[in-house]
Image: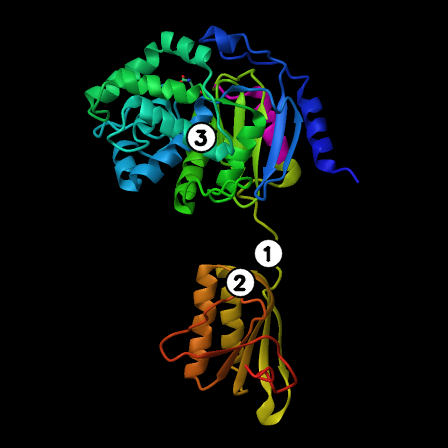
Amino acid sequence: MRSPIPDYLTQALADVGADTSGAPAGYIPELAAADPELLAAVFATVDGEVYGAGDLDVSFTIQSISKPFAHALALADRGFDAVLDKVGVEPSGEAFNEISLEVGSGRPLNPMINAGAITTHWLTGSEEMDSSERVERVVSGLSAFAGHRLEVDESVCASEMEHAHRNLAIGHMLRSHEILTEDPTAVVEGYIRQCAVLVSARDLALMAATLANGGVNPRTGERVVSERVVRQVLSVMSTCGMYDAAGDWATQVGIPAKSGVAGGLIGALPGQIGIATFSPRLDPHGNSVRGVSLFERFSSDMGLHLMEVPPAARAVVRSNHVVGTGPDAVRVFQLQGGIRFAGAERVVREAVDTAPAETTVALDLTRVSSIDDVARRMLLEIARRLTLDGHDVYLVDPESILPDPDPGDGGRVIVVGELDGPGDPAGQGG
Ligand code: GLN
């Protein structure tokens, strides 16, 4: 059987292909000359499967899509305090190249507009680095997100530098507010090299998938940045990634995203997939026209909107019953599925409401697929309180879904592989 996913992508490209509105970025000849008909869409799953259609291996410059990744590198290299001290996280509602800083502090509002991105570039690597070492840090960092070495397009870079008056103005303004404390020309040059890194839609999808996968590249297995950094970056992407169209995007598409003026667009859906599209014609915000249409379509066709409320999780308490009789009776709470806060609350409620009369109580985790940290603490607290109430608490956990179960403070659990005969949960010798 052939996978239906590439066919779906091919159909989606055919459907948006008729839209020829917008125009490629015109501020430098290299971007203005882009073939406006190029079109690609790629999905990369968090386990590294790539599905694509169209021109998925054509190279173009990453431009502003580098911004969230550089932000991630700065957070990883310098820490949150040092970065937040210089660049805020508030949506500006302004165009990407607005010459604006926060009143009072002089900080750029966020790392997605140019003022913030120029500062962010400067915050990557270590303070001692010179500008070429910093560029190398950024290019190698972007490469780690993509999973292979990326190169810089020298002609785009040179041309951007010749037309960089606005970015240089922003750089000088940052210098005058002492946000930058060194020659702004070198920093702006470094930022422009960062924007001129060549990628394909395939690369971008894998970069987005690395974010969706909590910072680990799903192909190479390399941890590029920590989960905490990814959470920060995806949050900023969702509030600021689409500039002055961020609110429209958040409601219509609902996927943390970032666009670039060469026509690329990425979205990262935590725990699911990285998506990339490529089509050079831009709307007045500087976002790819067909890219935006494709994302709107993907979001609605596949229910990818982050705020879409999932169907209430299947009851976490699969059954609550007693096996055995008399003094051998065991109260069994059989749990199932993935347990997070709301699921654990159901278990707490079940245990409280039941107030088991049986001395032995078993929490059966055989059908549980995952337990997050808060759910783990809540289940262990149930075990502790049951112990204090005089119960013997068994944890039926054949796959160690809840390893090292120590309820602490007077609590005690006995781990067994299966609930054996009626009234004999410890029948395995556990
Ligand atoms: N190099 C471009 C600039 O700084 C990137 C802007 C973008 O992609 N939105 O103006």
Query: Which residue position holds label 2?
Result: 343
Q: Residue furthest bottom?
A: 326
Measured from the top left, where is residue 173 in percent x and y?
A: 24, 18
Crowding at dot 2, Cα within 10 Å, few <14 / some 14-19 / many 20+, comes out as many
Q: Which residues are magenta?
A: 286-298
Q: Quadrant for the C terminus, please.
A: bottom right
Residue 196: assigned label? none
Q: Residue furthest right?
A: 1
- What's under tag 3, amino acid-wise? Leu
Badge nearest the viewer, 1 or 2: 2
Q: Quadrant of ligand 1?
A: top left
Residue 251 visible in the displayed image: no
Among the two numbered marks 2 and 3 on one chain, the one whose residue lies closer to the N terminus: 3
Left or right: residue 31 compared with residue 7: left
Query: Which residue position holds label 3?
Result: 142
Asked if residue 309 is among those painted magenta in the image, a careful observer would answer no
The picture quadrant where one finds residue 38 is top right
- 347 over 307 or under it: above or below: below
Asked if residue 292 is among those painted magenta in the image, a careful observer would answer yes
The one of 422 and 253 positioned closer to us in this rendering: 422
Helix, strand or loop at mark 1: loop
Helix, strand or loop at mark 2: helix
Q: Main secondary structure of the magenta part?
A: helix
Query: Which residue position holds label 1?
Result: 312
The one of 203 and 302 positioned closer to us in this rendering: 203
Q: CA distance from mark 2 to mark 3?
A: 38 Å
Left or right: residue 210 compared with residue 18: left
Measured from the top left, where is residue 158 in percent x and y?
A: 40, 10
Among the two numbered marks 1 and 3 on one chain, the one whose residue lies closer to the N terminus: 3
Badge nearest the viewer, 2 or 3: 3
* Disc 1 and disc 3 in contact, CB within 8 angstroms: no
